[in-house]
Amino acid sequence: MEKWNQTSNDFILLGLFPANQTGILLSFLTILVFFLASLGNSTIIYIICVDPRLHIPMYFLLSQLSLTDLMYISTTVPKMVHNFLSGQKSISFLGCGFQSFFFLTTGGAEGLLLASMAYDRYVAICHPLHYPNRMSRGMCVQMIIGSWILGSINSLAHTAYILHIPYCQSRAIDHLFCDVPAMVSLACMATRLYEYMVFVSTSIFLLLPFLGITASYGRVLLAVYHMRSKEGRKKAFTTCSTHLTVVTLYYAPFVYTYLQPKNLRSPAEDKILAVLYTILTPMFNPIIYSLRNKEVLGAMTRVFGIFSSKKE
């Protein structure tokens, strides 16, 4: 392990799997999850693109959420599995920078996209007459572009910093990928000010959108409670509960990882949480949205001819 500390500018990813038969089994399970997540999210994006009935803001935003999940798992899993199966643990300085940049960009964009989806449901249920104006196609495009641009700017700032701090000891990152908190712990300089900036950044991209989501769904649940139509109430509740499930899967591990003080975290906990939001959640989200959404199931029937119980 000492030789890892002497190698040029490359980093070492210690990874997740033990070097035994259990590790081999887990790596192949991860490949299966990667395949299912990629297939599921690609399918969601495809049917939203080709089915005109889904060309509304809610599903445009959903397609972007599927894109973020696809980027999440594609940024982290292939390199992790390749390193394990090849017996190598290194990742180049530039490769680590790209991995960190795309992961942080995706994370920031997803938080803002989830807030946009909550606002979409709030307007649709609480102000249905104003929905065409407040959530026009142009407004939806602005929300999507704005989410990606803000996520990219935030990511670029963090990536530039993390690649310019001195690493005068080990470059062995005890994580699945080049995650900022894991890399900061290797710095041989004081990072208190930067950790404060991470807290501020996390608050902007996680806590503020979460407060917006909470406020939106508080109003939505109140409106649903006063609905006279039982069918309308059921449909609204199903749609909102689906979104809230995805929100919980996204925010819980991120808040725990990025807002918790460094001295209270452990590499083992960080890696377990990373498995949740980089590997499992991208697989679960398409399942949650497809199986609990009649419009998506209907689109799959029209596009692929599946889930139909009778011939038309």
Image (cartoon, rainbow, N blue to C red):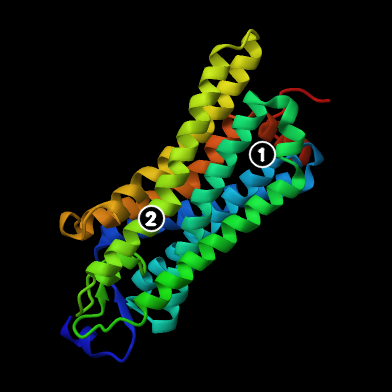
The quadrant of the picture occupied by the N terminus is bottom left
Q: CA distance from mark 2 to mark 1?
A: 25 Å
Q: Above or below — where is 18 with respect to 245?
A: below
In the image, 126 versus 13, the foreground residue is: 126
- Residue 180 figure quarter: bottom left
Classify residue 120 as left or right of residue 162.
right
Mark 1 and mark 2 in contact (Cβ < 8 Å)? no
Q: Which mark is residue 58?
A: 1
Q: Nearer the viewer, mark 2 or mark 1?
A: 2
The residue at the point 34 percent across, 55 percent down is 274
Classify residue 110 as left or right of residue 10.
right
The residue that label 2 is drawn on is 202
The quadrant of the picture occupied by the C terminus is top right
The residue at the point 45 percent across, 33 percent down is 214
Q: Name the spot of residue 85 as percent of width and height, x first.
A: 37, 70
- Residue type at mark 2? Thr
In the image, 179 versus 209, the foreground residue is: 209
- Residue type at mark 1? Met
Q: Name the spot of residue 80 as percent of width and height, x first.
A: 38, 67
Badge 2 density bin: few <14, some 14–19, many ≥20, Cα 10 Å: some
Q: Name the spot of residue 135 as percent of width and height, x first.
A: 71, 39
Identify the secondary structure beneath mark 2: helix
Classify residue 240 as left or right of residue 51.
left
Q: Which mark is residue 250?
A: none
The residue at the point 64 percent across, 58 percent down is 145
In the image, 209 versus 31, the foreground residue is: 209
Choose the circle earlier in sequence order: 2 or 1.
Answer: 1
Badge 1 density bin: few <14, some 14–19, many ≥20, Cα 10 Å: some
* Residue 72 visible in image: yes
- Residue 96 figure quarter: bottom left
